Image (spheres, helix red, strand yellow):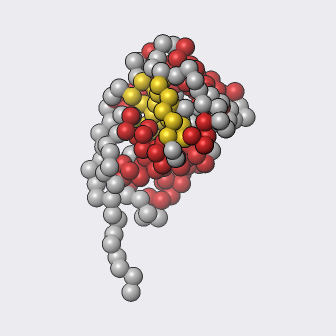
Amino acid sequence: MKSICVFCGSSMGVRPVYKEAAQTLGKTLASQKFRLVYGGGNVGLMGVVADAALLAGGEVIGVIPEFLAAKEIAHNELTVLHIVGSMHERKTKMADLADAFIALPGGYGTLEEFCEILTWAQLGLHQKPCGLLNVEQYFDPLLRLFDHAVKEEFLKSALRSLVLEASDAESLLDLFATYQPPIVDKWIGREVRP
């Protein structure tokens, strides 16, 4: 594992602990010699995690769609900045560049990116670890929803293990180091409706 993609908010959130967690994650990735791949912005938690990794001597690769480069203020001090044509190209490029995925707190975009990469894992398109940095239990409601999906048989319990979770960066990276992807047929049942 050499590169880790981080999905996170283009805003800071209301609590200072989110910024602190992004700074710690950026520093930790750099200190453990992981290349940071992220959405290429210079605002919100995106900018914080990138700046922290750069300040700690890390390599940072940003991927941003052309139409967002001005809105999210593309970070111009990165090791590499890829400007792509669409959100789909952004996600594909980040996935291609990364060996693992972490979500920090964020909104719709962060959740969508993380859930799409989970879906790709569920479908066997990759076997890379996917984890939530659960800062101050931010992701607890989402984790409860995943558990509910298992209970209601929309998700196999073995596939629930695709989501790794820890409250601090080092613990999450430790989980990544020992990650073994589940070998499971995605389909719960193929009942045909009458």
Residue at the outermost right position: 14
For the point 51% across and 44% down, the residue is 85
* Residue nearest the observer in this picture, 20 or 63: 63
What residue appears at the point 39 percent right and 46 percent down from the top-left corner? Answer: 162
Q: Residue at x 45, y 34 (%)?
A: 5
| Quarter location, residue 71 | top right
Decide if residue 136 is in sight here: no
Q: Is residue 12 visible?
A: yes
Given the current orientation, which residue lies at the most extreme left position? 183
Image-quadrant location for residue 181: top left
Q: Is residue 151 shown above or below 79?
A: below
The location of residue 160, given as percent across then percent down, is: 41, 50
* The C terminus sits in image quarter: bottom left
Q: Nearer the viewer, residue 51 or 131?
A: 51
Q: Position of residue 92 (x, y in %)?
A: 42, 44
Residue 188 lies, in percent from the top left, at: 35, 65
The residue at the point 33 percent across, 63 percent down is 187
